Image (cartoon, rainbow, N blue to C red):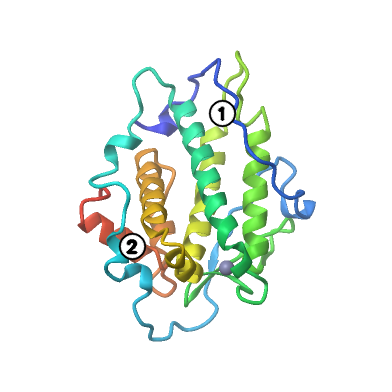
Amino acid sequence: MSFFNSLGRSMTGRQQRPGPKRSPTPTSGTFGSDGQIAPASPASTSPAPAINKPLYLCSPFVDAALVKGNFKTIVMLPKYVDVNEWVATNIFDFYQNINMFYGIITECCTQQSCPSMAASPSLNYTWINQDRKSVQLPAPTYIDYVMTWVQNLMDDETVFPTKAGRDFPPAFPSTIKHVYRQLLRVFAHIYHAHYPQILHLRSEPHFNSLFAHFLAFGREYELLDIKDVKGTANSPVGIGALWERWKENGILEG
Ligand SMILES: [Zn+2]
């Protein structure tokens, strides 16, 4: 099933997805006039130092999960469900869950602790502002921009239609791909910078399962590029190694 080949299909009568409102929209200059976001690109800031294996790659944490086995079955499109509808609903759930996890570690993610949106010792994501300039932002600011942008998209009937008789817009797949890439970055930052807090809360089985589900879903519906998961040789994404490990263990498809 290709999500991107599904354009033109429509769905009616979907249930309204409720959700909490986030903080006020960040600086309007951050967003394009069409409500889209320019994809940020990774930027290397410093040579990669020799590092110890991060905790999230160490046993037993790396294999901690709520769900045993492969995620393929839970990402498959249920019979009679429109693929756009399925993707929209899952995006909503991923957003809510990431938002919840970030909410409980937010006190530890400050301008001081996280002056950049780091995803590994050699990778800081940059934000593309409205002037098409690539800028460094503190992680809490970057994440607030992402989460507010996604919330606003989900509240927008023209992007995420919920009323009967409304179709998904033709740009829905590409919009969702942008959303997916940015949510991946939030995962990448939490794993890289805040895994000790996840462990402290004994939430690593939940968080790992959420992330594995996110990866499996993204691959199934072509929302996720492997290069975004793994980064480059000079600037690898920390969680790229997690993806490899879970593939080897049969949790994720190749
Ligand atoms: Zn942080």
Q: Is residue 53 above or below residue 230?
A: below
Q: Give the amino acid at mark 1.
A: Pro
Report x, y in % for residue 36.
65, 44
Report x, y in % for residue 84.
48, 28
Dot label at residue 170: 1
Q: Residue at x 73, y 50 (%)?
A: 23
Q: Residue at x 38, y 62 (%)?
A: 230
Left or right of 146 in this view: 29 = right
Decide: few, some or many residues near mark 1? Use Cα within 10 Å; few <14, some 14-19, many ≥20: some
* Front residue (pair 222, 78): 78
Q: Which residue is mark 2?
A: 242
Left or right of 220 in this view: 194 = right
Report x, y in % for residue 97.
51, 47
Cβ(mark 1) to ligand 1 < 8 Å? no
Quarter of the image where the N terminus is located:
top left
Decide: few, some or many residues near mark 2? Use Cα within 10 Å; few <14, some 14-19, many ≥20: many
